[in-house]
C-alpha cells in the first residue's frame, strides 16, 4: 500500500506540473506572442503568406512545395502515432503474468498496468488525430495560397469580391495547420512520462520535471527584437499616414 501511495501522489503532481506549464505558455502566446517561438513563428508565417500571394505566378511553386513538406512531416508523425497505438494495443492484450518486475517501485497490479498502457494509447491516438487535422489545414492552404486574390478583386464586382479569400485568411489557415502539428508533437512528448510510468511513479515524475525545463528553453525566447522592430515600424508607418491624411 505504501508503494501505491507514490502513484497517487507523484503521478498527479507530475501531470499537474505539465498542465500548469502549458496553461502559462498559452497565456504567453495570446498576451505576449513575441516572447515565445510559437508566437514569433505565427507572425512570420503570416508575413510569408502575404509575400507568396503578392505574385502567385512567381511564388506559386515555392508555396506549394513548402506546404507539401509540411504535409509530409505531419504524415510521418501520424503514421508513427497509429503504428505505436497498434503496438500498445497489442501489449495491452498480452498476458499479464510477465508484467510484474522487480524494478517497478509502485503499483504492480493488473489494473495499474492497464491504466498505464491505456494512457499511452490515448496519447498516441490523440497525436494521430491532431496530425490528421494538421494535414487537413495544410492541404487547404496549398490550394488557397495560389488564389490570385488581387487580380480577382480588381476584376470582379463587389458581390463576388465577398467570396474571394484574402492573404490574412490563408495565413490563419496555415497557422492552424502549424498549431495542430505542434499539438501533435506535444502529444508525443507527453507519452514519454507515461511510458516511464510503467517503471514506477518516480521515473515518471522526474521525466515531467525534465520535460518542463526542456519545454521552457524550447518555447520561450528572449531575443524578439526583429519581430518587435517590425511591428514598431508598421505602427510608425501607420501613424505617419494618419498624420498625412489629417
Image (tube, rainbow, N blue to C red):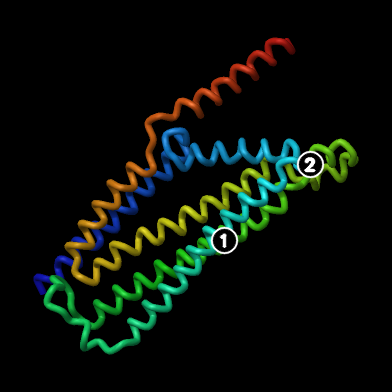
Mark 1: few/some/many CA within 10 Å (<14, 14-19, 20+): many
Left or right, 180 with respect to 48, comes to left
Vertical relation: 69 (above or below) 91: above
Residue hosting label 1:
133
Q: Residue at x 57, y 53 (%)?
A: 177
Residues at discs 2 and 1 in contact (Cβ within 8 Å): no
Q: Secondary structure at mark 1?
A: helix
Look at the picture and state if 127 lies above or below 17. Answer: below
Q: Examine the rendered structure and indicate whether residue 32 appears above or below residue 232.
A: below
Residue at image point 25% right, 87% down: 96
Q: Closest to the observer: 181 or 158?
A: 181
> Which numbered circle lies on residue 149?
2
Above or below 3: residue 148? above
- Picture coordinates of residue 116 (x, y %)? 29, 73
Q: CA distance from mark 2 to mark 1?
A: 25 Å
Dot placed on the residue nearer the N-terminal end, 2 or 1: 1
Amino acid at each position: 500500500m505504501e508503494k501505491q501511495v507514490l502513484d497517487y501522489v507523484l503521478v498527479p503532481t507530475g501531470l499537474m506540473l505539465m498542465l500548469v506549464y502549458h496553461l502559462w505558455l498559452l497565456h504567453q502566446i495570446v498576451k505576449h506572442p513575441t516572447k515565445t517561438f510559437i508566437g514569433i513563428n505565427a507572425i512570420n508565417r503570416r508575413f510569408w503568406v502575404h509575400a507568396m500571394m503578392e505574385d502567385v505566378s512567381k511564388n506559386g511553386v515555392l508555396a506549394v512545395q513548402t506546404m507539401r513538406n509540411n504535409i509530409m512531416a505531419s504524415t510521418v508523425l501520424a503514421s508513427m502515432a497509429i503504428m505505436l497505438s497498434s503496438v500498445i494495443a497489442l501489449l495491452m492484450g498480452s498476458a499479464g503474468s510477465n508484467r510484474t518486475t522487480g524494478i517497478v517501485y509502485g503499483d504492480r497490479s493488473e489494473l495499474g498496468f492497464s491504466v498505464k498502457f491505456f494512457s499511452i494509447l490515448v496519447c498516441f491516438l490523440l497525436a494521430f488525430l491532431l496530425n490528421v487535422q494538421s494535414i487537413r489545414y495544410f492541404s487547404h492552404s496549398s490550394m488557397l495560397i495560389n488564389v490570385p486574390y488581387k487580380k480577382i478583386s480588381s476584376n470582379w464586382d463587389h458581390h463576388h469580391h465577398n467570396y474571394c479569400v484574402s492573404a490574412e485568411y490563408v495565413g490563419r489557415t496555415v497557422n492552424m495547420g502549424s498549431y495542430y502539428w505542434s499539438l501533435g508533437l506535444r502529444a508525443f512528448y507527453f507519452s514519454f512520462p507515461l511510458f516511464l510510468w510503467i517503471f514506477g511513479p518516480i521515473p515518471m515524475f522526474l521525466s515531467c520535471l525534465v520535460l518542463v525545463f526542456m519545454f521552457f528553453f524550447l518555447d520561450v525566447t528572449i531575443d524578439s527584437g526583429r519581430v518587435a522592430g517590425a511591428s514598431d515600424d508598421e505602427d510608425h508607418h501607420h501613424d505617419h499616414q494618419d498624420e498625412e491624411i489629417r
